[in-house]
Image (spheres, rainbow, N blue to C red):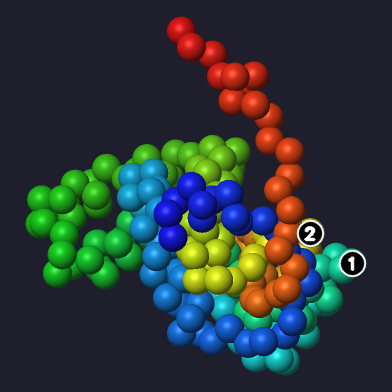
Amino acid sequence: MEFSKLNQSRHKVTQFDGRKVTVDEVKAILSEAVLAPSAHNIQPWHFVIVDSQEMRLALSTAMHGKNAVQNEAAGATLVVFSDTDLPERVRDMVEIGADFLPVDHKADLLMKLPGMFEKFTAEQLAEYLALNIGLVSQNIVLAANNKGLKTNLILGFDKVKAKEVLAIEDRFQPELIITMGYSDEQGTASYRLPVDDITDVL
């Protein structure tokens, strides 16, 4: 789909018809989404596809109000996590990319980035992760839209409880939930501030 049309046709949809989106289909979306840029190319994200009905219902207990209903009717539910252990993420990058990264680049990554990340304050870490998670999440909803799926980004959930329910490695922090699926609801465009009112030219 041409980008302008793709971008303009993406709207929040919260009512799904229950048709399943397979794990393979979600992974195909993620394969496109992870091409998003990230600071230092560190890609500090992790995903959980909540596929089983048992886990879907368990996750609903961590969700607020109508979000639980939406979760249970969606074709797929994806939880986007951030990786709070950035030095370990660097080591993962080097290990996983061993056959692709030049030797001098791997050495450079290991020498510079872990020390920099270890000096981050809690606030700096949160800001760094939020920026990167936002980038990949935008790509997820656009990639899903390109495949004819409707989506919604959910922030209204108990992150502590969701983490307990999903029992993912402690270094990963849940940031948002993306419901996706099929729906007759098209969604409507919401108001956007005019570019001229939010732009300075210096």
Q: Residue at x 60, y 38 (%)?
A: 123
The percent position of residue 94, horizontal first and vertical second, equals 24, 62
Residue 161: image x %, image y %?
A: 76, 70
Between 79 and 117, the one lying in front of the other is 79
Up-down: is 7 above or below 193? below
Query: Residue at horizontal 30%, vertical 62%?
Result: 93
**Mark sitting earlier along the chain (1/2):** 1
Q: Tell me the kind of residue under disc 2.
A: Gly
Tell me if 200 is positioned left or right of 103 in this view.
right
The x, y position of residue 20, in whole percent, is: 63, 87
Q: Quadrant of the N terminus?
A: bottom left
Q: Position of residue 11 (x, y in %)?
A: 67, 56
Q: Number of marks in the image?
A: 2
Residue 54 relative to residue 142: left or right: right
The CA distance from mark 1 to mark 2 is 8 Å
Which residue appears at 38% of the width and 48% of the height? 37
Asked whether residue 48 appears in the rendered view, the answer is yes
Q: Secondary structure at mark 1?
A: loop
Q: Quadrant of residue 72?
A: bottom right
Horizontal side of 108 relative to 174 (left or right) equals left
Q: Quadrant of residue 155?
A: bottom right
Pointer 1 with pointer 2, Cβ within 8 A: yes
The residue singled out by tag 2 in the image is: 156
Disc assigned to residue 50: none
Amino acid type, mark 1: Gly
Binning the other alpha carbons within 10 Å of mark 1 as few (below 14), some (14 to 19) or many (20 upward) gives few
Which residue is identified by label 1?
65
| Residue at image location 49% in from the left, 65% down from the top | 146
